[in-house]
Image (cartoon, rainbow, N blue to C red):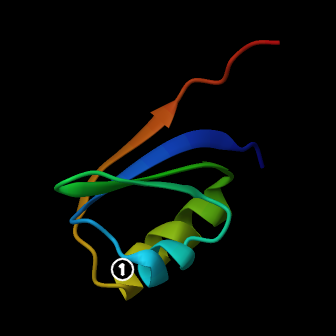
Amino acid sequence: MAAHAYEIRVVGSLGPAARDAFGGAEVEVEPTATVISARLDQAALHALLDQVRALGLELIDIKQFPDMPG
């Protein structure tokens, strides 16, 4: 299954323990939201979303970015 670049935005600024729950994903904390970015296949995307749900986070947005040729 092909992997794609995703950006998942959740409400609130996550602390260090919550950020660590997302393993190898890049986590950027903003004043009112946290952005989780990673290259994921469908199974990994669903696992990450399961982690968002397990932590009780409110999902704002999910974006899939087009693959870059080359």
Q: Quadrant of residue 3?
A: top right
69 relative to 27 in the view: left or right: right
Vertical position of residue 56 compared to residue 35: above or below: below
Q: Position of residue 65 (x, y in %)?
A: 52, 30
User: Which residue is depicted at the point 60% across and 49% down?
Assistant: 38
Q: Give the labeled residue for mark 1.
A: 53
Q: Position of residue 12 (x, y in %)?
A: 21, 66
30 relative to 2 in the view: left or right: left
Q: Quick one: 53 or 30, which is closer to the camera?
A: 30
Say which element carries label 1: helix
Q: Quick one: 26 or 44, which is closer to the camera?
A: 26
Q: Quadrant of residue 53?
A: bottom left
Q: Position of residue 49 (x, y in %)?
A: 45, 69
Which residue in the rendered view is the most extreme toward the left? 32
Q: How many marks?
A: 1
User: Which residue is depicted at the point 43% across and 79% down?
Assistant: 18
**Looking at the picture, which amino acid does disc 1 mark?**
Arg
Q: Quadrant of residue 7?
A: top left
Vertical position of residue 31 compared to residue 57: above or below: above
Q: Name the quadrant of the C terminus.
A: top right
